[in-house]
Amino acid sequence: MTISVLVVDDDTLVRTGLRMMIETQEDLEVVGEADDGEMAVALALELSPDIVLMDIRMPGTDGLEATRRITHTRSEDIERESPRVIILTTFELDDYVYEAVRAGASGFLLKRTRPEELLAGIRTVAAGDALLSPSVTQRLMREFTRVSNPHGLPTDVSNRDLDRLTQREREVLIHIGHGLANREIARELHLGESTVKTHVKRILMKLGLRDRVHAVVYAYEVGLLSPGGTSGGSH
């Protein structure tokens, strides 16, 4: 299936470059462009793209507010999920990135990312996987827990929801929190990759989480993992 993409950036050259890059791929299609957050929200609702590539710093409605509105607004087609948002940022540890994850973004890419990595990132997020390498995950979550408001999770979940998970599911969640992909988790836990995929799906369903990125945030915010990257001992 073709992955539909909405490109959002106030720089015309950036949008044009992204469109040209994306449209070289047979499985990717740019369905629209927006130069500010307000237009992005309107087009996301109208076009229901699979992915929104979202710049953060824009005049008027910025990428943070646009992300929040896009990920929390469903289209008239109730069978279709709201688009997944990938934040485009200039800096790896931009404070806005952490707020964007809380607002519902499913990952982020640096604007200096190589074309092949950006294209792979679009496919990764469209498939529901994390767009954070282990090293970036550690740095992101350390900073996230430092700068973010400790009250409120990306979804209506709490520590009590951990009781819904089996011991094995908790182990898988911890490994997700460390930024491991399914194949790596399977190797660490001596499981089949398909079994890990099943555990991941059950974890997201039981906790009411949108995707793996928000599973990482959840694991840190409820104390299952500490900002230093180790497993918490209170649960």
Image: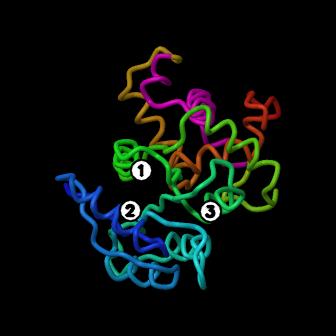
Q: Main secondary structure of the magenta part?
A: helix
Q: Give x and y (percent) for residue 79.
A: 32, 69
In the displayed structure image, the side of residue 138 where residue 195 appears, left or right: left
Answer with mark 2 or mark 1, whichever residue precedes in sequence.
2
The residue nearer to you, when weighing 164 against 80, is 80
Q: For the residue labelled by badge 3, is the local secondary structure a helix, a strand or a loop? A: helix
Q: Give x and y (percent) for residue 58.
A: 58, 76
Answer with mark 2 or mark 3, whichever residue precedes in sequence.
2
Type of residue at label 3?
Answer: Ala
Residue under label 1, please give it.
125
Q: Residue at x 38, y 25 (%)?
A: 193
Q: Residue at x 52, y 18 (%)?
A: 189
Mark 2–mark 1 CB contact (< 8 Å): yes
In the displayed structure image, the side of residue 233 where residue 85 appears, left or right: left
Residue under label 3, please give it.
100
Q: Quadrant of residue 174?
A: top right
Mark 3–mark 1 CB contact (< 8 Å): no
Q: Pick the quarter of the image with the N terminus.
A: bottom left
Q: For the residue labelled by badge 2, is the local secondary structure a helix, a strand or a loop? A: strand
In magenta, the rendered stretch is 160-187
Q: Pick the quarter of the image with the C terminus.
A: top right
Residue under label 2, please give it.
51
Type of residue at label 2?
Answer: Ile
